[in-house]
Amino acid sequence: MTETPLAYADRVRTLLGYRTVSELIADDHNVFIDPYSALLSVHARIGTGNVFSPNVRIDAESDALRIGDGNRFFEGTRIEATDGGRVSIGADNEFGPHAVALLANRHDAVITVVSRVRLIGRIDLAGASTLGDGSQILGDVTAVNVSLVGGGSHRDPDPDLRGAVLKGRGRATGLTLARGHVINADGDFATAAVEAQSVYHPRPAPRSTDLSTAGHQATLFSIITINTDTVSMWLLLRHFCIRFAFVSSRRCWARRNSRRTSFMSAWPTSRSPPSTGTSATWSRTS
């Protein structure tokens, strides 16, 4: 009976120490965009929410490689944790686009990538290297035995609080770079200048219309106080208007009643209408 392509791929991967295509397809916790081109060692410990693009290759020995959650491995990413080397990857990191390689293939090689790290370009990371939280390597860089101190991610509004950055092209060996600093090199990173990241990413200037928190609260309190006083004055004015209208109305009725009483009192009580059929002239007597 002819072996199916899936069965053949699964058999070969099992012989070479990789997870089978069927296992990658059945993984409900991670995404393999092309499970036929991804090679993942059976010894790799992987978290959840990771995305593996085509042509990703991960080789590892037992307990030599740990990957956290929410990482993105772009096309061509290669990770080696072999021959006594170890690799530890945290969460929310980006490996690529372009070819990124983490090569811990010696007994003294320990590569640690914490969280929110970006490796973009043609990056080779080797030796005993630590990339702290939010650090970055950008360009065409070979980094060996480097330590990039962590800080905020590349989205942090203050560039001088971000993780350390290596960018450009060339080789960086034995470097330790503090938070908020960057080396932009073309050749040997050891001879390039160390600069503040704000040189390349200036802080946004505060707007003149912005108010401090305390000032804003004070202004808001003043507005509320003014509005409260205005409402109180309006209510008081309304009360006086209603009161004035009521009193004026009563005085008006009192004057009308007084005039009517005076008029009726002035009318003679002894008069009587003339009799029917008489020719006498009826006149008002005083």
Image (cartoon, rainbow, N blue to C red):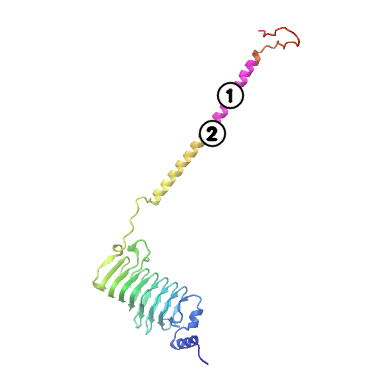
Disc 1 designates what residue? 252
Distance from disc 1 to disc 2, alpha carbons, whole Å, reads 20 Å
For label 1, the crowd category at 10 Å Cα-Cα, with few meaning under 14, some 14 to 19 and many 20 or more, is few
Residue lying at the far right in this picture: please name it: 277
- Residue range in magenta is 242-263
Residue type marked 1: Cys
> Mark 1: which secondary structure?
helix
Residue 258 image offset from top left, x and y in percent: 61, 19
Asked if residue 42 is positioned above or below residue 253 in the image, the reply reads below
Residue located at (28% from left, 69% from top): 183
Local SS, label 2: helix
Q: Position of residue 112 (x, y in %)?
A: 37, 75
Where 277 falls versus 123 (above or below)? above
Please tell me whether residue 9 belongs to the stretch shown in magenta.
no
Q: Residue at x 38, y 79 (%)?
A: 78
Residue at image location 40% in from the left, 50% down from the top: 214
Name the residue located 55 percent from the left edge and 29 percent from the top edge: 245
- Identify the residue under disc 2: 239
Quadrant, the C terminus: top right
Is-magenta flag for residue 247? yes
Residue lying furthest bottom:
1
The number of numbered discs placed on residues in the rendered structure image is 2
Three-letter amino acid code at the position of disc 2 = His
Image quadrant of residue 67?
bottom left
Give the answer, above or below, for where 26 lies relative to 285. Answer: below
